[in-house]
Amino acid sequence: MNWTPVIVFYVKTTAWVVLPLVIGLIAGKFTESQTLFFVFLMIGFGITCFGIYKEIKQYKKNL
């Protein structure tokens, strides 16, 4: 059994979860406003949702 496609899918979705949220947290931390911090965090969350949706769609297509 070849686990490579599953592992690649896992790594891609994990990267979509971690990277936008961490970048949003770091960008928001350097702002002095809690409102901008929240905005950056929500933008990161939106990018995460879109990226995971894109990866799932591509993975289902390749099945």
Image: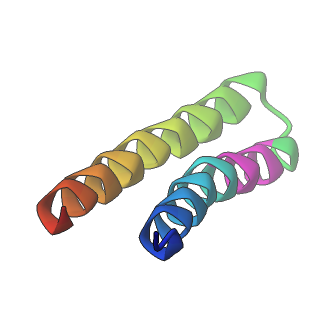
The residue closer to the viewer here, 63 or 22, is: 63
Vertical position of residue 35 compared to residue 9: above or below:
above
Segment tinted magenta in the rendering? 21-28
| Residue situated furthest left in the rendering | 61
The picture quadrant where one finds residue 7 is bottom right
Nearer to me, 56 or 16: 56
The count of marks equals 0
Image coordinates of residue 54 in percent, x first then y, are 27, 56
**In-front residue for pair 43/63:** 63
Residue at position x 47%, y 62% in the image:
6
Q: Which residue is drawn at 54% across and 32% down?
A: 42
What is the quadrant of residue 10 in the picture?
bottom right
Q: What kind of secondary structure does the magenta stretch mostly adopt?
A: helix
Q: Which of 8 and 57 is in front in this view?
A: 8
Q: Position of residue 23 (x, y in %)?
A: 71, 57
Residue 44 location in percent, x, y? 56, 45
The type of colouring in the image is rainbow
The image quadrant where one finds the C terminus is bottom left
Q: Residue visible at 66% across and 59% down?
A: 19
Q: In this view, does 18 lie to the left or right of 7?
A: right
Q: Position of residue 4 (x, y in %)?
A: 51, 75
Residue at the spot 46% in from the left edge and 74% down from the top edge:
2
Indicate left or right for 24 with 34 as reference. left
Q: Looking at the image, is 62 positioned above or below residue 18?
A: below
Q: Is 33 on the left or on the right of 49, as rendered?
A: right
Q: Which residue is farthest front?
A: 1
Q: Residue 58 lies in magenta, yes or no?
A: no
- Left or right: 29 in relation to 27: right
